[in-house]
């Protein structure tokens, strides 16, 4: 596991042995980074998020943020990202809402180009 000295990884995060966490990245509580995941630099994975194997997340992406929903009151909700994805610069992926089963799910083998947004409850 390679964690850059400027990165911050919460003690409640789970990282596979070969994960790479680049400069100025933040990995929050309840985050699971599977084998081969690479956070290039300046990536934020906020909380309660699973990132599938060999997914690469590029600079300034914000993953696992609170759902952008007026009804969200801090309930436990999650984000699940499949394997072999490329998430490019400035993408945002939000966790689900209780009204939408509490989870946002992203499949595998996808390219999310710069600035893409995956909103709460997407499947």
Image (spheres, grey):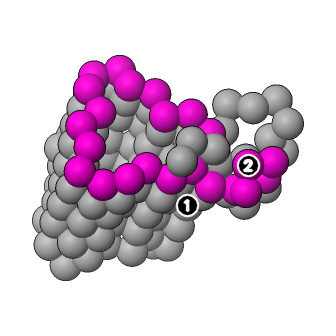
Q: Residue at x 63, y 44 (%)?
A: 121
Q: Secondary structure at mark 1?
A: loop
Placement of 91 over or under 8, stated as above or below: above
Q: Answer few, some or many: residues within 10 Å of disc 2's Cα (few below 14, many 20 plus, some between 14 and 19).
A: few
Q: Which residues are magenta?
A: 98-120
Q: Position of residue 82 (x, y in %)?
A: 35, 59
Decide whether residue 118 is among the magenta residues.
yes
Placement of 98 over or under 31, stated as above or below: above
Residue corresponding to mark 2: 100
Q: Secondary structure at mark 2?
A: helix
Q: Position of residue 26 (x, y in %)?
A: 38, 49
Q: In this rendered view, identify the residue nearer to me: 99 or 61.
A: 99
Q: Is residue 28 left or right of residue 15?
A: right
Question: Which of the 4 quarters of the picture holds residue 62?
Answer: top left
Q: Residue at x 27, y 22 (%)?
A: 114
Q: Residue at x 27, y 60 (%)?
A: 83
Placement of 80 over or under 17, stated as above or below: above
Q: Is residue 39 visible?
A: no
Q: In this rendered view, identify the residue nearer to me: 78 or 59.
A: 78
Residue corresponding to mark 1: 48
């Amino acid at each position: 596991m390679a964690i850059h000295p400027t990165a911050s990884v919460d003690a409640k995060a789970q990282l596979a042995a070969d994960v790479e966490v680049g400069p100025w990245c933040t990995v929050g509580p309840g985050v699971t980074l599977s084998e081969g995941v690479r956070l290039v630099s300046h990536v934020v994975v906020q909380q309660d998020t699973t990132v599938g194997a060999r997914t690469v997340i590029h600079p300034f992406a914000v993953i696992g943020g609170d759902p952008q929903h007026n009804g969200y009151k801090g309930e436990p909700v999650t984000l699940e990202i499949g394997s072999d994805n490329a998430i490019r610069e400035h993408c945002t992926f939000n966790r689900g809402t209780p009204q939408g089963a509490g989870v946002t799910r992203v499949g595998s083998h996808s390219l999310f180009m710069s600035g893409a947004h995956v909103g709460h409850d997407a499947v």
